[in-house]
Image (tube, rainbow, N blue to C red):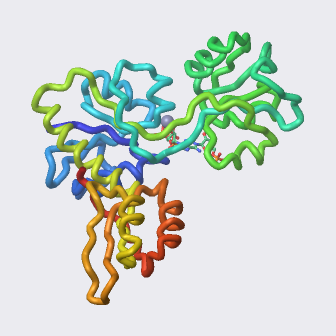
Amino acid sequence: MLKIAIQKSGRLYEDSIKLLKECGIQLSNGNKQLKTIADNFPLEIYFLRDDDIPQYVFDGVADIGIAGENVLLEKAKDLELDYRLGFGKCRLSIAVPKTTAYFTANDLQGLKIATSYPVLLQQYLSEKNINAEIHEISGSVEIAPGIGLADAICDLVSSGSTLFTNGLKEVEVILRSEAILAVNKDLSAEKKILLEKLLLRINAVKQAKNNKYIMMNAPNGQLKNIVALLPGMKSPTVVPLSSEGWSSVQTVVNENDFWDVIEKLKQFEAQGILVMPIEKMII
Ligand code: PRT
Ligand code: ZN
């Protein structure tokens, strides 16, 4: 049995549960208990505060855990952090009051900076040879400058609206973070096999999200150009249509290249382009 720790409630809870579901893992008990066992995969799920997840995985109470990179790096436990999950994206940034003149990181010299991330902030300041005072607080960091507790803050930002409403401006990004599947470094051989099975599923879900399945009708005279444009998983499927001189072309396109590819397909006279989501993709 593999044991996974996920957040009990909060920003990562929904996406963590969704990922397990998309991996075909069914949970009949919610997060009301401390732990539950999956119905159809040898997986035990622990529901914890995100801050406790690195320690639990390091101690081997859980074998793996889903937490933000910000929390995992701040707690600095010796864990494998290779598997990025693509959700919970945010940045750890330094912000100062809008009215503060700020040009370079050197302007932080001698300031008092409030944060819940003293380890990551100190690393950043040391790398830049900046002497600043770190004032550690556990919540509502954004109000610190307004009440005279600090000159600047270092906190997580996603939309930036919290900074904006508190009259602050983001001046340095010290980490770009997302949820990571952290893994204990001493897993038994049996647990490693289960982890591989889980990772195969996670990768299939991630690949599917990053790709679209497209189908189109193309004049045979342009097939060479179109096929050259579409690498697909191996190469595109080309099937003749019943109308003379036309073929149907089907392939997989990466989300990042998607609009570029569509524009070029139009130039090569492709018609009736259909785009479909992919549920799972195993390469
Ligand atoms: O109870 P528990 O300790 O488990 O939860 P928590 O309250 O400590 O954490 P939670 O649920 O708020 O966040 C969990 C994780 O989500 C974080 O560790 C990050 O990895 C990730 N994440 C992604 C965020 C944000 N986006 C985020 N915007 N965590 C916090 N915020 C906060 C930020 O601290 C600030 O107060 O949202 C505010 C800023 O948001 P914007 O949109 O106004 O910029
Ligand atoms: Zn927390």
Residue 149, position in %: x, y? 77, 26
Residue 241, position in %: x, y? 28, 84
The correct choice, above or below, for 55 with respect to 267 in the image is above
The picture quadrant for ligand 1 comes to top right
Looking at this view, is 188 or 258 the one in front? 258
Q: Which residue does the image show at 37% across and 65% down from the upper left?
A: 224
| Image quadrant where residue 72 sits | top left
Q: Which residue does the image show at 22% across and 44% down from the upper left?
A: 198
Looking at this view, is 250 or 222 the one in front? 222
The correct choice, above or below, for 147 with respect to 232 in the image is above
Q: Which residue does the image show at 29% across and 21% down from the upper left?
A: 59
Looking at this view, is 70 or 215 the one in front? 215
Residue 177, position in %: x, y? 52, 36
- Residue placed farthest to the front in the image? 221
Q: Which residue does the image show at 44% across and 20% down from the upper left?
A: 76
Residue 116 in sight here:
yes
Residue 193, position in %: x, y? 13, 35
Residue 21 in sight here:
no
Q: Is residue 247 left or right of residue 169?
A: left
| Image quadrant where residue 110 sits | top right
Q: Is residue 58 left or right of residue 132?
A: left
- Residue placed farthest to the bottom in the image? 243
Q: Quadrant of the N terminus?
A: top left
Looking at this view, is 88 or 165 the one in front? 88
Q: Is residue 187 left or right of residue 46?
A: left
| Image quadrant where residue 98 sits | top right
